[in-house]
Amino acid sequence: MESIINFFRPKNKNRAALSTLRGLGFSLPRVRKALLDLNNIKLRELSLAGGLAASTLSDTIRGMKRTPAAQRLFAVTLELEVKELFDPHEILGDGSE
């Protein structure tokens, strides 16, 4: 029963959505955008909270830039790891931050 309860906690909800959408063949940039939408997170608000330009955050989420601070902000906000949300070639460093 505990595992079922834990599955529906926000962190696990995001991990389940990530896994399901990837399993359905969606690209990581599309999955990242979907996670924003599913959590009702606005890019502008997130960028202001994280002290980043909205364009930098948007470009990082779309996979057009590799900005470690934006990747970390996005991952922390969703309670996931950078390496879960970004392919290895998108990550500068080891992605464990």
Image (cartoon, rainbow, N blue to C red):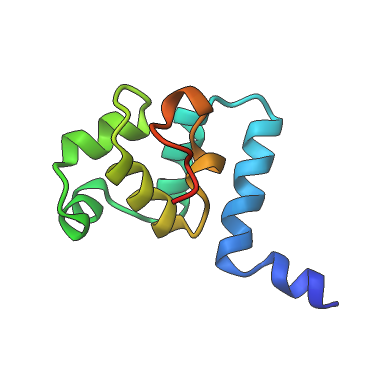
Comparing 85 with 21, the one in front is 85
Farthest residue toward the right? 1
Horizontal placement of 66 versus 44: left or right?
A: right
For residue 3, above or below residue 43? below
For residue 63, above or below residue 17? above
Residue at image location 42% in from the left, 32% down from the top: 91
Horizontal placement of 6 versus 70: left or right?
A: right
> Which quadrant of the structure image shows residue 33?
top left
From the top left corner, tell me how far across and down residue 51 is, in percent. 15, 54
| Quarter of the N terminus within the rendering | bottom right
From the top left corner, tell me how far across and down residue 45 is, in percent. 21, 56
In this figure, what is the number of numbered marks? 0
Residue at image location 80% in from the left, 70% down from the top: 3
Residue at image location 80% in from the left, 77% down from the top: 2
From the top left corner, tell me how far across and down residue 70 is, in percent. 29, 43
Farthest residue toward the front? 93
For residue 43, above or below residue 31? below
